[in-house]
């Protein structure tokens, strides 16, 4: 990381990943070109993340050819004018992780992953979960991403006095 003063620890980065409304997952397509898409991911143990998709398409083709992926999450993104020097800048909190993606083939794990995704994004509608799974499990793919290392985090944030909050300094 170029600016080590903005680096945050992996627990902080995991918190960002859990709070982000979506995480951009970057794939390498079979022809070697890049393909990144924001997805609604959830985690069951901080080391394993899941998303769902159609049974065919660019994501699954990319995973079959190149299972290595990069995850990127950003929260609290706010353009601002630097309080000390008037520069145009951006306050943000971000996290990045690398992992291996693979299609989930075990039906029980698919249901568990879909339940975790639903609980994260639609907890108020869990009474409809069983029926939704019954109707669409056969046409839904679930992908597991196993992180190859803990995520890294980075932020740029100013306190109320206009001082940038460096590594280790929390709100």
Image (cartoon, rainbow, N blue to C red):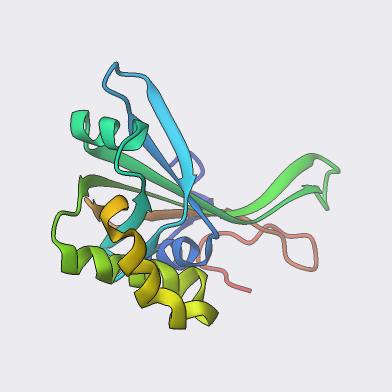
Indicate whether 29 appears above or below 2.
Answer: above
Closer to the camera, 138 or 26?
A: 138
Residue in view at x 50 percent, y 45 percent: 38
Indicate whether 83 appears above or below 25.
Answer: below
Instruction: Give the number of marks.
Output: 0
Quarter of the image for the N terminus: give it: top left
Q: Quadrant of residue 56?
A: top left
Quarter of the image for the C terminus: give it: bottom right
Residue lying at the far top of the rendered structure = 31
Q: x%, y% of residue 159?
A: 73, 66
Q: x%, y% of residue 41?
A: 41, 58
Closer to the camera, 148 or 22?
A: 22
Residue lying at the far left of the rendered structure = 106
Closer to the camera, 97 or 152?
A: 97
Indicate whether 159 appears above or below 30.
Answer: below
Q: x%, y% of residue 3?
A: 51, 43
In the rendered image, is residue 65 in sight? yes
In the rendered image, is residue 141 in sight? no
Residue lying at the far front of the rendered structure = 135
Q: Is 75 on the left or on the right of 25, as rendered?
A: right
Residue in view at x 71 percent, y 60 percent: 158
Residue in view at x 21 percent, y 50 percent: 148
Q: x%, y% of residue 144?
A: 25, 54
């Amino acid at each position: 990381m170029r600016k080590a003063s903005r680096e945050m620890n992996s627990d902080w980065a995991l918190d960002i990943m859990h709070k982000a409304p979506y995480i951009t997952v970057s794939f390498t397509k079979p022809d070697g070109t890049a393909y990144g898409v924001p997805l609604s991911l959830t985690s069951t143990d901080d080391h394993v993340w899941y998303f769902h998709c159609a049974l065919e398409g660019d994501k699954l083709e990319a995973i079959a050819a190149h299972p290595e992926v990069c995850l990127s999450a950003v929260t609290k993104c706010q353009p601002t004018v630097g309080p000390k020097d008037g520069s145009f800048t951006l306050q943000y909190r971000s996290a990045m992780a690398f992992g291996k993606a693979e299609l989930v083939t075990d039906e029980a794990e698919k249901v568990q992953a879909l339940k975790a995704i639903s609980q994260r994004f639609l907890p108020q509608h869990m009474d409809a979960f069983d029926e939704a799974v019954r109707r669409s499990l056969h046409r839904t793919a679930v992908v597991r991403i196993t992180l190859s290392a803990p995520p890294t985090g980075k932020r740029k944030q100013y306190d109320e006095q206009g001082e940038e909050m460096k590594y280790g300094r929390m709100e």
